[in-house]
Amino acid sequence: MAKLRWLVSGVGRSGTTLTYSVLLSAARAEVPNTLGRYEPFLWGEQTWDKLPSEFGDAFSRTDAISAAGIFAHKQIPLFLDSNTPQMRAFLDETLPRNRSVVAKLIRGAGRLAAFLEHDPDLKIVHLVRNPLDVVNSALLHFSFFGGEFHKSDEARFEAEAQSKFPGAHRQIESEPEAIKALEWWRLMNEAALKSAEQFPDRLMVYPYERLMEDVAGGMAEIISFLGGQGTAINEELLSEKVGPVTHYKCVRACDRDEIMPFVNDYFSDQRIFSREGDASHVSAWRSKLHEKYAACVAGPP
């Protein structure tokens, strides 16, 4: 029986938990003993080998945090195109080569090429979403720089981004949190898109907006790309509410206005939206987004 080695990647707030749930269930329909690894750079055995609906109170318990995962995350560069000894050791321990495994990461977008180089059987779907929704939700729920769990990644993100994207990185030290989150969103997704160009047969970039238009069809397409059987999807999971849903508008009007050009760039990116018929959907998605954030509070600049 062939091994299934699948990774769900994203920057955050882009449907990765839902996708992980559907993919882990589908993989187990084909290979019953498939392992599940949920955010192994942060969470440990309290969440492993379980569907998100089975996590219980794991996220409120310190014994669910993986000290080894956090240590590995801090030792491994945020942007990495080839392997390091620390990366190899972590992957071999977390994603054992002799087993089928489905993993989910929002701390790996800058490392996808290294993952694929290390494991020739691995396939990845990277989920992207417009920056306004992502930043708005992140401001309410967590920091991309991880300061809630360890020393913030902000300083090393600055240093690595200057090297990885010379002339394109915006200094964020004195910027408000919304703009810091925007820069993380922008460069991490750019790194993932470049990795997809390098490994087009093993890394698919899939937009959240398209997935939400047809969750069943989108999941079937993703599973087919990964090498699984779309018929193995548990349809009950497609409408399951997993992870926090954000209704509150956290971004201020000044943040919204600064982020909006990047929203336009996102919906114009042919690496993401190049299918026949995308143009009409993109127009509707963009209009809906403008309407959604029209009434943001002003706030200081």
Image (tube, helix red, strand yellow):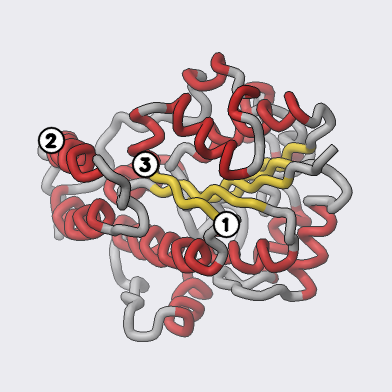
Front position in the image: 220 or 42: 220
Q: Residue at x 31, y 47 (%)?
A: 275
Q: Residue at x 53, y 60 (%)?
A: 200
Left or right of 224, for residue 5: right
Q: Residue 290: x and y, percent? A: 14, 41
Q: CA distance from mark 3 to mark 2?
A: 17 Å
Q: Residues within 10 Å of mark 2 (few under 14, many from 20)?
A: few
Front position in the image: 8 or 256: 8
Residue under label 2: 291
What numbered label is drawn on residue 137?
3
Q: Quadrant of residue 45?
A: top right
Q: Residue 252: x and y, percent? A: 19, 48
Q: Quadrant of residue 67?
A: bottom right
Q: Quadrant of the C terminus?
A: bottom left
Residue under label 1: 201
Q: Residues within 10 Å of mark 1 (few under 14, many from 20)?
A: few
Q: CA distance from mark 3 to mark 1?
A: 31 Å
> Going from the N terminus, do you reach mark 2 or mark 1 first?
1
Q: Is residue 193 above or below residue 84?
A: above
Q: CA distance from mark 2 to mark 1?
A: 37 Å
Q: Residue furthest top?
A: 236
Front position in the image: 288 or 158: 288
Q: Is residue 296 visible?
A: no
**Element type where label 3 sits in the image:** helix
> Going from the N terminus, do you reach mark 3 or mark 2 first?
3
> Going from the N terminus, do you reach mark 3 or mark 1 first?
3
Q: Nearer the viewer, mark 3 or mark 2?
A: 2
Q: Amino acid at mark 3?
A: Ser
Q: Quadrant of residue 265?
A: bottom left
Q: Is residue 177 visible?
A: yes
**Element type where label 2 sits in the image:** helix
Please report contact status of discs 2 and 1: CB closer than 8 Å, yes or no.
Answer: no
